[in-house]
Image: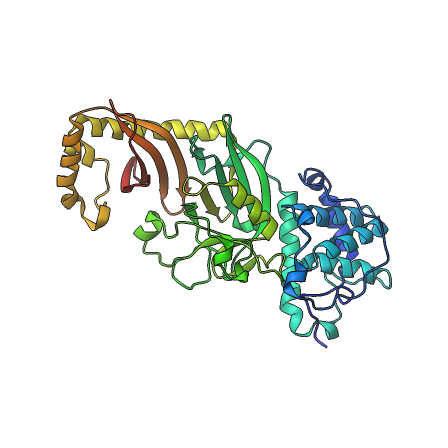
Amino acid sequence: MPLNLTHRTHGCARALVALCCTALCLGAAAAATPHKPSQRAAGKPAKAAKPVRAAALRPAPDKVRDGEAEARLIEIYKLIGQAQTRAALAKAQALVKDHPNFSLAQLVYGDLLTAQQRPVRAFGDVPDSAVGTGAQALAELREESQQRMRALRERPPAGAIPAQFLQLSAQNKHAIAIDASRSRLYLFQNDPAGPRLIADYYISVGKLGIEKVAEGDLRTPLGVYFITSNLDPKSLKDFYGSGALPINYPNPYDARRGKTGRGIWLHGTPPEQFARAPKATDGCVVLANPDLERIIRTVEVRTTPVVIAPALRWVAPQAAQAEARHFKDVLQAWRSAKASGDVNRLLAFYTSDFAPNGRTLAESQPLMKVELGRMRGRDVELKEVSVLRWTDNAETMVVTFGEVPAGARTGATRRQYWVRQGPQWKIFFEGVVG
């Protein structure tokens, strides 16, 4: 009979020797995990799980906490690495009881049960006769385990931030950075002293990986985005879990390069799944529902940036601030040109293909003259400036600021996309976002 990898216990086995080696490497990382697993008494091994209704697969409300299930899984790994298999078995039994839809936890529990009867042979040691059509699902669980453990071994340096976060404004109360190579989402809180990492979570990306180019290519886009809305879970199918946070793909840089597609969301999992394989979506970023719920409760629509990178590069905040100061000189030069009232001087800051609202640069010139005329040479103050960098085959900056003419109390919130052309920075898109 083919192995049912959605509801497994006795039929699965993990190579405890390999797991011990990995768990020993996880010692320091597991100790740094912010959520402590709950303590439970040991009991008799559970019987093989039976298929249950989706609603029954939801953990009890008092047990749903972001990061909690993963933290408990890592503690089990750590106990195995310390040869405390009896304690590991008890905690694994408690974990699958609380989260029966957590397939990876079921796999570990099955390994520990199997180890009571015979030595295991390999990582995810399931008899060939039992695997059947579940071979792919088993391989995906192995990859999920490796990704979770890698991210916990290779922690960001203390106090470091992603290199893309050159400057966040007070309007950016939170920020998100996604490292696709580690299947990991990092959540930051922007304190007066700068961005501070407050949580991180396992995520899934596109079935065919990253670097989305076209509609339906099953890839997750790369770039700098912003959360555009918060979709009510009552309006969504169960497939999307606890809710969804759409992002603004394709952004102006994507559009400039001819990328297509739409509907890229951060969303949850259906009730019968705690998590999905590292590469399992149609292009969205998917989290376990408790983790998504924490993000939904935390972040703000329109002002929360989401950086999706192949691999994050972590830098000291001082290094990012130094680079931000250099670019702010460029931004201030643009401000001075706009305040001068000289349209030719201002046009020097725009690319030849700058085309707001479908107009060419030449067609935009009369509108720029009208706007400059309204300002009557008044100075412009830039408030709440944020600068996010993106580098692939070109270097770009996504800049958001409040533009307040001298003498006015308020002004428009403007977003610009700059690209480096040789030694110069030029604007290829700008628009009002608030």
Quarter of the image with the N terminus is: bottom right
| Residue 333 found in image quarter | top left
Q: Is residue 331 left or right of residue 114?
A: left
Where is 410 relative to 150, above or below? above
Q: Is residue 405 left or right of residue 110?
A: left
Quarter of the image with the C terminus is: top left
Q: Is residue 138 left or right of residue 242?
A: right
Report the colour scheme.
rainbow
In the image, 314 versus 218, the foreground residue is: 218
Residue at 36 percent of width and 39 percent of height = 397
Where is 64 relative to 319, above or below? below
In the image, 298 versus 384, the foreground residue is: 298
| Residue 46 found in image quarter | bottom right
In the image, 396 versus 278, the foreground residue is: 278
Can residue 336 be spotted in the picture?
Answer: yes
| Residue 304 found in image quarter | top left
- Farthest residue to the front: give it: 234
Where is 293 relative to 328, above or below? below
- Residue 309 horizontal/vertical position (percent): 48, 47
- Residue 352 horizontal/vertical position (percent): 21, 44
Residue at 67 percent of width and 57 percent of height = 102
